[in-house]
Amino acid sequence: MTLDEISARVVACARCPELRIYCRQVATEKKRAFSDWNYWGKPVPAFGDPAARLMLVGLAPGAHGSNRTGRMFTGDGSGDFLYPALYRAGFASQPQAFSASDRLRLRECIITAAARCAPPRNRPTPQELRNCFPYLVAEFDALPRLEVVVGLGAIGWEAALKMLRERTFALDPSPPKFGHGMETTAHRGDRTITLIGSFHPSRQNTNTGKLTEPMFDAIFARAGSILRISNRAS
């Protein structure tokens, strides 16, 4: 499938009826600060460049972020930290992300998530993650130029590992436990994917200093260096 076809299936997905009800409820009740918004209130598809060489795998849409705007990491504190970092690294056309119509474009980068509906308390269940997993694999299959995957948070990291195993990649060395800046390399035939771990840019992490701008910039500098080395080799 193409990314557009996958996105259409994501938006129409009803595999988790309880989440569809929750997302619609949030979209109806709204947050006072966004009372004038017409919330998206549906599963959120991947966002980015169809020729992406870098994939970011997050956790799930925020109830008043992506569930409101309809675009990954747009409209909440996590996106306010992520997109400036992508801009500084050259992967985004602008540092701000307000809405799906703000003209932001990603370069050689795509953003997706382990779960596509906003879950209560931002905690998808194991079954909900399993229900979403085929969409992540389909997106991987639609990105033949992909070379680097960044797992944002432990759940994003585990979803990315599972995706690579599903596509029979051999991991070298044995996958380390999740940690900021941890790496593992996946091989299948003549194709190589580098998986990098990063703390999630949630306010819980950024407000406490667990994740700082220099730490986050280092992740995308590392991703960029891998892609530049690949360019020179080709």
Image (tube, rainbow, N blue to C red):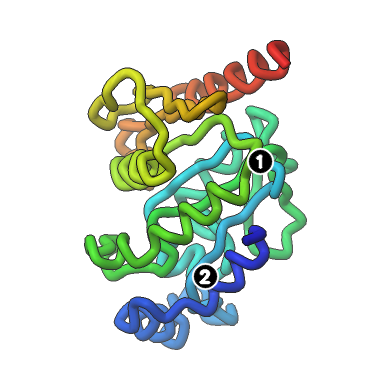
Q: Amino acid at mark 1?
A: Ala
Image height of 90 relative to 38, above or below: above
In which quadrant is the C terminus drawn?
A: top right
Judged from the image, the secondary structure of the residue bearing numbered disc 1 is: loop
Residue 54, x across and y down, in percent: 58, 36
Residue 189, x across and y down, in percent: 51, 27
Q: Residue at x 52, y 80 (%)?
A: 35
Residue position for label 1:
52
Image height of 84 relative to 19, above or below: above
Residue 200 visible in the shown view:
no
Residue 25, x across and y down, in percent: 38, 85
Q: Residue at x 30, y 67 (%)?
A: 128
| In the image: residue 158, left or right of residue 32 | left
Residue position for label 2:
10
Judged from the image, the secondary structure of the residue bearing numbered disc 2 is: helix
| In the image: residue 116, left or right of residue 96 | left
Residue 163, x across and y down, in percent: 40, 45
